[in-house]
Amino acid sequence: MSKPRSSSGSWLSRQERDPYVQQARRDGWRSRAIYKLEQIDQKEKILRPDMVCVDLGSAPGSWSQYVTAKLKGRVRIVAVDLLPMDALQGVEFIQGDCNDDEVLQRVLQAVGDVGADLVMSDIAPNISGMRAVDQPRSMTLVELALDMVRTVLKPRGSFICKVFQGAGIDEFVADVRNSFESVRVLKPRASRASSREVYLVARKYHL
């Protein structure tokens, strides 16, 4: 998640004290966000060998890194982000905007006719610290992620998505429920208590 520009000093200080940041450095993960996905997977058992996965908002790559490690390389991942991302074995990275038709076509080509088994999104906007600005931006991003789901996800596939509690979330959750048999809202232990972020875990996609 992007840090508030107005409080970069306190954000950096908090990062240095954060036990998940320290643990990620010790364990060789690219960011603390890995523990959010790990905790979701421990509860939901969402990952399985030989799946095709699309990772939206992937940089710096910790979610793709976790999936590859958990499945011992038996996975094909297509990762997408506006920011650059260092290469990971078994991961095809596409740098660009998910809303760009050219990027979408590249994702579709990479996934292939079979479709994706899992779309996961840890996308967050650049945080200004003003909820009236940040919440609409975050909802726009999750709606783009859902558009991607409806384009690339195969029937009975799964969707994991970060969303911020606030205006628009109830309508978004209802929209997701229209396309999936099961939708759960989780807050992993690795999510900071002060954060409004939660994660939707949607299973068994239907057209």
Image: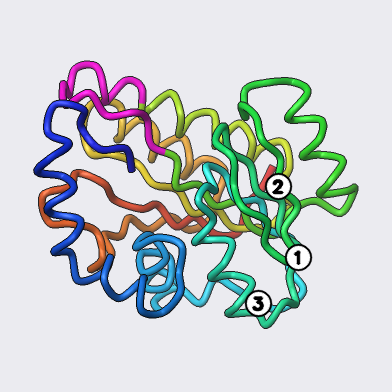
Q: Quadrant of the N terminus?
A: top left
Image side of residue 114 versus residue 19, left or right: right
Query: Quadrant of the rendered structure where residue 133 is?
Result: top left
Circle 2: residue type: Phe
Residue with the mark numbered 3 = 48
**Secondary structure under the numbered disc 2 in the rendered image:** strand
**Secondary structure under the numbered disc 1 in the rendered image:** loop
| Colour convention of the picture | rainbow
Residue at x 57%, y 32% (from the top left corner)? 82
Please say if 123 is above or below 70: above
Residue with the mark numbered 1 = 90
Please, which residue is most extreme toward the right here?
113
Based on the picture, tell me whether residue 34 belongs to the magenta stretch.
no
Mark closer to the chain start, 3 or 2: 3
Mark closer to the chain start, 1 or 3: 3
Circle 1: residue type: Gly
Camera-nearest residue between 92 and 133: 92
State the CA–CA distance, disc 3 to disc 2.
Answer: 21 Å
State the CA–CA distance, disc 1 to disc 3.
Answer: 15 Å
Query: Which portion, as a residue range, is magenta?
Result: 124-137
Q: Which mark is residue 93?
A: 2
Please say if 127 is above or below 116: above
Q: Nearer the viewer, mark 3 or mark 2?
A: 2
Camera-nearest residue between 195 and 169: 195
Residue 35 percent location from the top left of the image: 36, 69
Residue at x 46%, y 29% (from the top left corner)? 141
Query: Quadrant of the rendered structure where residue 26 is?
Result: bottom left
Q: Nearer the viewer, mark 1 or mark 3?
A: 1
| Label 2: few (<14), some (14–19) or many (≥20) C-alpha neighbours in 10 Å | many
Circle 3: residue type: Arg
Residue at x 73%, y 42% (from the top left corner)? 152
Residue 39 percent location from the top left of the image: 36, 73
